[in-house]
Amino acid sequence: MFEKRSLQKMIRSDDQTAVLRKSEIADEIYEYLKSENLMKQVRDYGLFPTRYLHKINSAENIVLSKFFDDNFNIEDFTRQLGKRLTAPYRIQIDCALLIKHDKAETKFRFVWAQRNLAFNTRKLIRGKEDFDELLSELGSMNRVELTRKIFDIHRTQSCFDRSEYSPMRLLTTVFFLAKI
């Protein structure tokens, strides 16, 4: 319970996120997100279920979503997560992004973050060594490389590989946590 409360404190209020979204997202993208009713997904939030545990290992599954603003550093945020959680746990990280196609009827498309498409290779954290390896992996990519990696993973999964869609912007980073 202490860890859950600590994680909840990492989530910015809806008001704070709304100000960031309005100032950092281009008007055309902002209007698209608003018209598609996606504003609730492009913000900070957490899902902390109290009754639903994994049937086999009784793991608690928690989802933390962070708006990917201009100052968001995925490595620093993950480091803060690691200070709040005790091992062992699983962490799978993916991002929601916006893709665009200039010639398509619908210019933009929202791509959802998915647990099974997590980009991090170190997922099981059993101790400090595993966590340091995860931080090293996250720190080795800049924002452009991360966007490209996320897009490549999603386009093969979602059949964008034969289309002319291109990545536009990372919108959220989602941390799928399973406390074992």
Image (cartoon, rainbow, N blue to C red):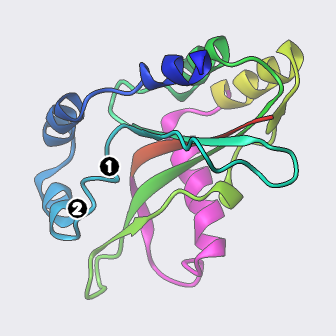
Q: Quadrant of the N terminus?
A: top right
For label 2, the SS is helix
Please tell me which residue lies in front, 159 or 38.
38
- Tally of numbered discs: 2
- Please say whether residue 179 is one of the residues in the magenta stretch: no
Please tell me which residue lies in front, 149 or 172.
172
- What's the distance in space between the residues labelled 2 and 1, CA to CA? 8 Å
Q: Residue 155, percent across and down?
A: 58, 71
For label 1, the SS is loop
Please determine whether, in this image, residue 48 is positioned above or below residue 96: above
Q: Quadrant of the C terminus?
A: top right
Chain-order first, disc 2 or disc 1: 2
Residue at 21%, 41% in the rendered image: 21
Residue wearing tag 1: 42
Q: Which residues are magenta?
A: 140-169
Residue at 57%, 15% in the rendered image: 80
Residue at 22%, 61% in the rendered image: 33
Mark 2 residue crowding within 10 angstroms, few (<14) / some (14–19) / many (20+) = many
Residue 67 visible in image: no
Q: Residue 156, percent across and down?
A: 66, 73
Mark 1 residue crowding within 10 angstroms, few (<14) / some (14–19) / many (20+) = many
Q: Residue 93, percent across and down?
A: 63, 43
- Please say whether residue 148 is one of the residues in the magenta stretch: yes
Residue wearing tag 2: 33
Residue at 66%, 30% in the rendered image: 138
Instruction: Report the side of 146 relative to 45 (left or right).
Output: right
Circle 2: residue type: Leu
Please determine whether, in this image, residue 141 is positioned above or below residue 114: above
**Extreme residue toward the bottom, this view:** 105
Q: Residue 46, percent across and down?
A: 45, 38
Circle 1: residue type: Val
